[in-house]
Amino acid sequence: MATETAGNSSATASEHGSEGHHHTQVGTVALALGALGVVYGDIGTSPLYALKEAFTEKSHVMAVDRINVFGVCSLAFWALVLIISVKYLMFVMRADNRGEGGILALTALVMPARGEGQARIPATAKAGILVTLGVFGTSLLYGDGIITPAISVLSAVEGLEEVSTSFKDWVIPIAIAIIAGLFLVQRRGTGAVGKVFGPIMMIWFATLALLGVSKIIDAPEIIQSINPYHAYHYFTHQTGKAFLSLGSIFLVVTGGEALYADMGHFGRKPITYGWYGMVLPSLVLNYWGQGAFLLKHPEDVESIFFRMVPESILVPIVILATMATIIASQALISGVFSLTAQAVQLDYLPRIAIRHTSQKHSGQIYVPLVNWILMVACIGLVLGFRSSSNLAAAYGIAVTMTMAITTLIFFRVLVDRWNWSHYKALALCVPMLVIELGFLGANVVKIPHGGWFALAVGVILMVQMQTWRRGRTLVAERIHRGERPIEEVLDEAEDIKRVTGTAVFMFKDLGKAPPALVNNLRHNKVLHTTTLIVSVATSPEPRVPLTERAHVTKIAPGVFQVQLEFGFMDEPDVPAVLSTIEMRGLSYDPDDVTYFIGRESIVAGKAPGMSPLAEQLFVLLNRGADSASRFFNLPVDRVFEVGSRVEI
């Protein structure tokens, strides 16, 4: 049979320094302002609780003396510089995947490549370990997405207690109302609200800086904490407590992963400009200001931030802080939505309903199921922990583990993608890992006091993702056993009657005959004038250009094999892509198409491959998966589903 092909293969994932964003100077400044509202919300609200927890966390209550104040301020400064400025901005954010960042995009860079360039990618077993770590890091970020809104909103609303003690009983109800309202408006999308996020956060960071400067004036010697000797002296002064306090000091850099994850929305340069132009100076000045305030008022350690504020402007600052924490929460919620969409595309989660809330920006999505689960979990945390101090014990361990995993995967990117020598890569990554493992070790003691929650979320999602991935592989293997080559089936059907119209058979395996097509030939004895056998694959790249998504092969008169390839951040709109393909002999009318899709009924059996518990979990997940027709944006009034029973 004649074979003819059309279409282009997609480009490989980006290499060192390929950012994928090109902006004018004015555009870069505008994006930097936007990044203030989305990227820096989490790290920008850390001053509300980070330094307080360094002194008051139950596992390491510290004396508020000169040595400890200088030591904590020194550690806060160097954590911001080494983890955010050096690790993320200088190095990790250069490891973009076609301009997209985040641990899942980084993981895609170490997945075994197909075809050209495969020699540069790690062996499958080694890559499998790294991919598993990447999936676990992704799972941990869901825990972060649950805890961040709860601790951020609670810490801001607790400022009302400084206004009047009569507000004490209202803190939790107000926090719950704000959290519920935040999740209830998610379905409207973040576009309209996002326009005001940047200016509000600019006011917030300016406020942080001014509050800090107003206290530094009273004790300017606090600036000497920039000398790392004070951190060394701090550790030699009370070594045990100083080490444990790292778990709380780490709170100053929570949100660091968001810089990398949100790179696709803004680009590396705008995020970098925002960091050095406003965020880093404001945070450093505020932490130094808190240190200077504690030198003069050690008794106010239980609520450092709000007691720094002049009483005349306390209420406006509480309102501003609450707005800032809502914005910080929004950034994490949007990040979890994006992670979910990526995980579904990469086949680590079942298909679920994902709604796009903007016609201009494909990254603005709403995931109803995830939204309501997050809302219930956040409210449950507020009711269960009841204060930001208690929640701080649950916060940090998930982020430290994710950062350490990012460093491990980044090492492979340095060696396999950037062609660094092992010694050069180790010289960069080992110091990063030592710092992060130090923070992680200090956070381990938090596990019994709340850290277990983030780990439990991570482990549960990790098991779910790996079970789904393994189950999908087994189902594909079972289906393969009864498959026949498409050429063989068509050869037997040469005398079959042709009917007008176009039939699209959705089937994953290239070169094989879809069961729905075989059944149509066997029972109806017909074949459509134009028949497309469409296979959908997800690229390890975040986006594939529309003109490069379709790869068409003619396998018989009127019969074509169509390979569609979407990036893991693309919306898999099959009809939209099919309407763009052009090829000699292919007559395609989008309004005259019938879509045939298979729907497997999965049952747990005795076949080898998964444990009984894992089989039952996979069957449950499969039942809850969204329909393929909705996932691929197929018109519901022109879809035929053909069922089959598969035992795993």
Image: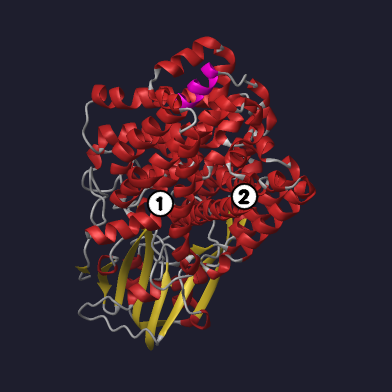
Distance (Cα) linking label 1 and label 2: 37 Å
Query: Closest to the observer: 608 or 47?
Result: 47
The residue tagged 1 is 262
Magenta region, residue range: 66-75
Secondary structure mostly taken by the magenta-highlighted segment of the chain? helix
Q: Quadrant of residue 428?
A: top left
Residue lying at 41% horizontally and 48% vertically, measured from the top left: 261
Q: Quadrant of residue 232?
A: top left
Amino acid identity at mark 2: Ser
Please tell me whether mark 1 sits on a helix, a strand or a loop.
Answer: loop
Residue 151 in picture, x, y percent from top left? 62, 44
Name the quarter where the N terminus is drawn: bottom left
480 in relation to 606, above or below: below
Residue 74 highlighted magenta (yes or no): yes
Taking the view exactly as shown, the residue that stands out farthest to the top is 236
Which numbered dot is residue 406?
Answer: none
The residue tagged 2 is 312
Q: Is residue 166 left or right of residue 405?
A: right
Query: Closest to the observer: 26 or 3?
Result: 26
Residue lying at 44% horizontally and 46% vertically, measured from the top left: 258
Residue 307 highlighted magenta (yes or no): no
Residue lying at 25% horizontally and 38% vertically, measured from the top left: 417
Please tell me whether mark 2 sits on a helix, a strand or a loop.
Answer: helix
Amino acid identity at mark 1: Asp
Residue lying at 32% horizontally and 40% vertically, measured from the top left: 89
Residue 495 in picture, x, y percent from top left? 35, 82
